[in-house]
Amino acid sequence: MTRPSGGRLAGATALVTGASQGLGRAIALAYAREGADLVLVARRPEPLEEVRAGAEALGARAVAVAVAADVGRPEDTERVAAAALTAFDRVDVLVNNASELGPTPMPYLVDTDPDALRRVLEVNLLGPFLLTRALLGPMLAAGRGSVINVSSDAGVVGYPGWGAYGVSKAALDQMTRIWASELDGSGVRVNAVDPGDMDTAMHRAALPDDDPAALARPEDRTEVFVRLAVLDEDGSGQRLEAATFAPAQA
């Protein structure tokens, strides 16, 4: 397969967490079509390898890092960063997509086990913090980079039963704004994206009665992630809704 040469992300290296399914898989393949090199991270090696093969079939160079990859564990995050920098010397684009929903059926906060809350915060907040911090040095040295945090409307609206997840996404949004403020003028941009309701395994676990036909496909929510990954784009500290960006035309 001929490597894409004229894509919007030609020459860039992107790391995507939670890349084995759903939105993460869709972002990874969209990046591959646009010419990016890829570091793909997830906990399950088999589906992750399928995504890697799919990306390479599109002409991308791709490395799959299945560090039982639990981004909520500092030692695993260090392994992810080391593997990425060993494979490609740098990471230009980081997509913090991996998320933990918490117990299902989803309990009210008063009934949420503290260990369950801790687990959600480790994956959804601590993981993005650790991975961003680990990869920030080379981005700052290069004077460019894009960090994209996957948010949710549950971080803005106080939905009953979405306590642990909502708290984690609200904190992720605030961390995005703080990173953006602290990195202003450095060439490194940090933004958040709310992908909206999609037909994914996480959505089915949270809301099993929803009609999949009424939900967006993850493949139709990737355009904003491509635009934010383009290294000469402007804008940092934004919270964008993926549904407002039209899918790229084939």
Image (cartoon, helix red, strand yellow):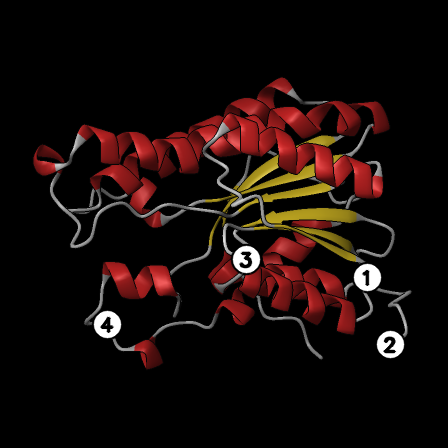
Q: Residue furthest top?
A: 182
Q: Are marks 4 and 3 in contact (CB under 8 Å)?
A: no
**Which x, y percent locates residue 248?**
66, 71
Q: Is residue 123 left or right of residue 14?
A: left
Task: Identify the amino acid type marked 3.
Answer: Gly
- Marks 1/4: CA distance? 35 Å
Residue 35, numbered circle: 1
- Marks 4/3: CA distance? 21 Å
Of 239 and 86, nearer the camera is 86
Identity of the residue drawn at 57% across and 32% down: 77
120 is higher (above) or lower (below) than 178: below
Q: On the image, numbered disc 4 is attached to which residue?
A: 210
Of 231 and 75, nearer the camera is 75
Residue 24, numbered circle: 3
Label 3 or label 2, whichever lies nearer to me, is 2
Disc on the earlier residue, 2 or 1:
2
- Marks 2/1: CA distance? 12 Å
Q: On the image, numbered disc 2 is attached to which residue?
A: 1
Disc on the earlier residue, 3 or 2:
2
Disc on the earlier residue, 1 or 3:
3
Of 199 and 174, nearer the camera is 199
Q: Quadrant of the N terminus?
A: bottom right
Query: How many numbered marks appear?
Result: 4
Task: Identify the amino acid type marked 4.
Answer: Asp
